[in-house]
Every structure is written in C-alpha cells, then in structure tokens.
Amino acid sequence: MAYGHKTQHRLRVRGRVVLHVARGRSHACIARETGLHRDTVRRRRGRLNQAGLPGLEDRQRRGRPVSFTPLRSAEAKAPACRLLPACRE
C-alpha cells in the first residue's frame, strides 16, 4: 500500500506513516520524512493504535444527507440539456 502505483496518494502517505510507526520512529521524525505536520502524524498514529488498519480509512463526514436520488437529479436536469429549436425571423 505504501509504494503501490495504483494506490491513492493519501493512502500511500498513510501507509508510509504506518511503516515509520512500525520502525519505532518519533512523531517529529515521521513528520519530517513524510512532509506532514506533527499533529497529523499524531492523529494517524492514534487512529492506527485504536482501530488498526481500518482506522486509516477516511471517516464519514458530516453534512446534509442527499435529498435527491441520481435518477431524480437527472430528470430535473434533462430539460436544460435539450436542444432549443432554431429561431426563425
């Protein structure tokens, strides 16, 4: 995961943090080598200790729930996508 070419960038960075943690490096050392802030490293390490590898996944974000299904959304946008008849003078 840490070195996969098809892995998303954020997961690669998180994988590298895991490898550094496994080697017993400090927060400051990991932050310096990965280019992350120390607080980010501390947060990732805490989530790793608490939940294991699944703790590295993105957490569900807050926000308004989706009010329209994809089909309803497409139906609402369809009239705007139709071609208009040519104007005649």
Image: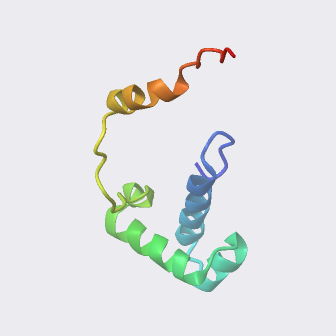
How has the structure been colored for display? rainbow
> In the picture provided, is 32 more to the left or to the right than 50?
right
Looking at the rendered image, the quarter that the C terminus falls into is top right
Q: Is residue 26 visible?
A: no
Residue 2 placed where, x, y %? 62, 53
Q: Quadrant of residue 55?
A: bottom left
The mark tally for this picture is 0
Q: Nearer the viewer, residue 59 or 2?
A: 59
- Measuring 30% from the left and 39% from the top, which residue is drawn there? 68
- Residue in the foreground of this view, choosing between 58 and 26: 58
Residue shown at 71% from the left, 73% from the top: 33
The front one of 67 and 88 is 88
Horizontal arrangement in the rendering, residue 88 relative to residue 46 (left or right): right
Instruction: Say whether residue 76 is visible.
Output: yes
Relative placement, left or right, of 1 versus 68 is right
Position in image of residue 34 (x %, y %):
68, 70
Q: Residue at x 54, y 25 (%)?
A: 81
Vertical order, 36 against 70 (above or below): below
Residue 36 image position (x, y, % from top left): 64, 74
Above or below for 56 versus 4: below
Give coordinates of residue 62: x percent, y percent: 33, 62
Residue lying at the far front of the rendered structure: 89
